[in-house]
Amino acid sequence: MLNAISPLLELKNVTAYRGQTQVFDNLNLRIEQGEQVAILGPNGAGKSTLLKLLAREIYPLVKADSYVKILGSATVKIDELRQQIGLVSHDLQTGYNVVSTAEQVVVSGFFGAIGLLYQHYPLTDEHYQQARRVLVEQGLAALTKQHFHRLSTGQQRRLLLARALIHQPSTLIFDEPTNGLDLKASFELLKHLQTLAQKGLGLILATHHLGEIIPAIDRLILLKQGQLFADGSKQKLLNSKTLSELYDTPLQVVEHQQRYQVLPAS
């Protein structure tokens, strides 16, 4: 049973592998419900692995005095989790086949299915009506019957966001939001995420790009070589010294109107 007042995610002494590679060893971390958090770190630091632990796509090594609790439960059911957490990732975007329509992509979110696998579940008119409502709310109604593979990368990303919102979750997980998008599509997506966060949606965002850290995000989790490098406020950690140490290269962080960019240090 999920607990509405428990932390969103609680990790204690967690060891986790991706295939044969150990990513985390005795990681401890806590994220509260409703937080807007960005996860930063070099390739291989564990950003995607942390999101997959939260989404129950991978599981930690079983050992004494160690657990991953989501909304207060170490044995959360996937269907219950799907009601509370929406997920958007590049892996998900590449999973849809050429005949899926925009409407079908959104409907598949009811069951966490990819491609036409959703057809094996009991679909009703209400499912389709709700999908169309979400498409309208997200400004995507014109795409309803268009094939997913014929849309721009930006439109596909927005559709996956609509899919993630089909259950009206309390938290959205986004892995590298603007990966593959041009400037216009990137800015439109980030503006939309800012609006959702301002409405109270919890946001967990893994990124390489400081430009994706929207003003609503106030906490940073910095990972390096599978360890928690730093955890704190954006104002405290988003600076040249900390990021230079995180990425092992001289960097200069630039801020303008609550937006951040990073440059090579001269």
Image (cartoon, helix red, strand yellow):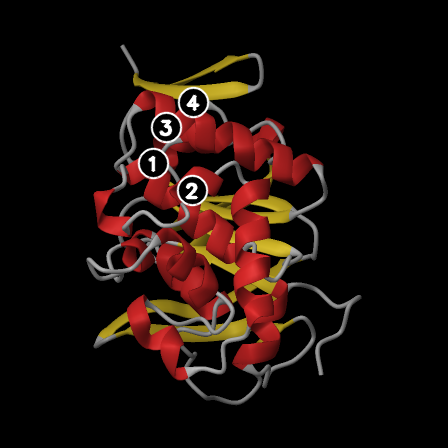
Q: Which residue is mark 3?
A: 185
Question: Mark 4 or mark 3, which is nearer the start of the sequence?
Answer: 3
* Disc 4 from disc 1: Cα separation: 31 Å
Q: Residue at x 56, y 42 (%)?
A: 136
Residue 24 x/y as whole percent: 38, 67
Q: Nearer the viewer, residue 22 or 187?
A: 187
Identified by mark 4, the residue type is Ser
Q: Which residue is mark 2?
A: 158
Kindly identify which numbered label has been placed on residue 154: 1
Identified by mark 1, the residue type is Gly
* Disc 2 from disc 3: Cα separation: 9 Å
Mark 4 or mark 1: which is in front?
Answer: 1
Label 4 environment density (alpha carbons within 10 Å; few <14, some 14–19, many ≥20):
some
Of all residues, the one furthest to the right in this rendering is 5
Q: Nearer the viewer, residue 110 or 12?
A: 110
The N terminus is located in which quarter?
bottom right
* Disc 1 from disc 3: Cα separation: 5 Å
Q: Secondary structure at mark 3?
A: helix
Q: Secondary structure at mark 2?
A: helix
Label 2 environment density (alpha carbons within 10 Å; few <14, some 14–19, many ≥20):
many
Compared to 229, does 113 lie above or below?
Answer: below
Q: Residue at x 52, y 36 (%)?
A: 139
Mark 4 or mark 2: which is in front?
Answer: 2
| Mark 1–mark 3 CB contact (< 8 Å) | yes
Kindly identify which numbered label has been placed on residue 240: 4
Identified by mark 2, the residue type is Arg
Kindly identify which numbered label has been placed on residue 89: none
Q: Residue at x 57, y 19 (%)?
A: 258
